[in-house]
Image (spheres, grey):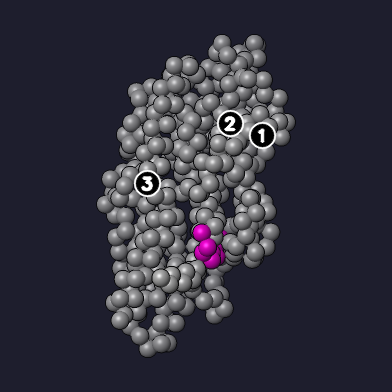
Amino acid sequence: MQCAPPSPPLRWDIFCRVIDNFGDIGVCWRLAVNLVQRGQQVRLWLDDASALAWIAPTGATGVSGVSDATGQAGVQVLPWRTPFDRFNTTPGDVLVEAFGCEIDATFIAAYADSISASGLDLGFCQKCVWINLEYLSAEPFAQRCHGLPSPVMSGPGRGLTKHFFYPGFTAGTGGLLREPDLLARQTAFDRSGWLAQLGIDWRGERLVSLFCYEPAGLSALLQQCAQDARPTRLLVTTGRAATAVRHCIDEQNRRQPLWNERKQLLISYLPALTQPAFDHLLWSCDLNFVRGEDSLVRALWAGKPFIWQIYPQHDNAHHAKLEAFLDWLQAPTSLHRAHICWNGIAPATPLPALLAPQTLEVWRSCMAQARTRLLAQDDLTTQLLALVQQLGISRALALT
């Protein structure tokens, strides 16, 4: 029996406007690399690629031949400038509009012109699959809207159709980003060796990672660590987390100079971490504090107890989003309480006891069950490839 030849790789254009240089670009870079690892060709259009200098330092040095921090070549990073050079760019087979960024109108105009020049109807003969990659949410609308068509009613793309792609935690959504070798790498991880590479003299103390904005409960957390019977080493990421910790310590020293007299709280300020190194940080710790979307997903795959600081919205819409996630997580009462205090939804003082061994064990069990549920689902890239194939086949049949 003769096997069918393999399908040629698709050409992907992923567009991302960088709002939070840790989050938006972090998700898009992981997606781009994941697609390349599965044989696809990817161009990543960024209005600000500066964060790649530390997220993927071996992969952000040029326009083409880009590789991620593990050496995976193939992602082409291109500047998204205004005005867009529509005359020297040919759109690929798949357009991905990340987080509502709206693909540059001149790029869409070039695509529309290429169809019109062939004398074909714009809507009927759409050649590219156009995906609107949305933010991650556990709210019910994600499952209801996942995969739905969204006709373009105005602008140069009028007559074309986008399709919503909603990442999510349940069947019926687009799943979460996960590399095929993730669990194998985690199993082989050497915590002591990795900490030693960072110059951290770890002697068995509790390890807690901190990647945050300016959480309401930070001062209370530092005090808990200082007062606990077991020493705690806080591994603080660079940027806003480090600034917030230093500010809290200065305030605490002014109010109570001997608050950490027994030196039960040890602090290590970390350098900027690549994406693989951030995974290593989460795998190393007994408790992780994470923020935003990308680090939430990585904390789930780490399977360790964690508290998520959700991105705050001015209309408090993030409250419902956090509650929906905690409902999906089946968070025990203590973990639910810790989240709403950490996020300032409830008073942060007193902060629930976060370091008690029995509490962390309950949380660890909760996270293990959540990760098992997620591993039973296809990952985001697998589902995205399947949707693109389905839409492409449907379009080809419509044209025959």
Q: What residue sits 35% from the left and 25% below the top?
A: 332
Q: What residue sits 44% from the left and 21% below the top?
A: 361
| Mark before the other along the chain sequence, 1 or 3 | 1
Q: Main secondary structure of the magenta part?
A: strand
| Residue 278 horizontal side relative to residue 320, left or right | right
Residue carrying label 1 = 194
Q: What residue sits 62% from the left and 31% below the top?
A: 191
The segment highlighted magenta reads 38-46
- Give, as a three-letter code, the residue at label 1: Trp
Q: Where's the N terminus, which quadrant?
A: bottom left
Quarter-of-image position of residue 275: top right
| Mark before the other along the chain sequence, 1 or 2 | 1
Q: What residue sits 51% from the left and 27% below the top?
A: 287
Q: Nearer the viewer, residue 303 or 273?
A: 303
Q: Nearer the viewer, mark 3 or mark 2?
A: 3
User: Residue 255: image x %, image y %?
Assistant: 59, 15
Q: Nearer the viewer, residue 82 or 32?
A: 32
On the question of residue 154 being in view, the answer is no
Task: Describe the element under mark 3 as helix, strand or loop.
Answer: loop
User: Residue 387: image x %, image y %?
Assistant: 36, 61
On the question of residue 374 being in view, the answer is yes
Quarter-of-image position of residue 97: bottom left
| Residue 245 horizontal side relative to residue 169, left or right | right
For the residues bearing labels 1 and 2, Cβ distance under 8 angstroms = yes
- Give, as a three-letter code, the residue at label 3: Gln
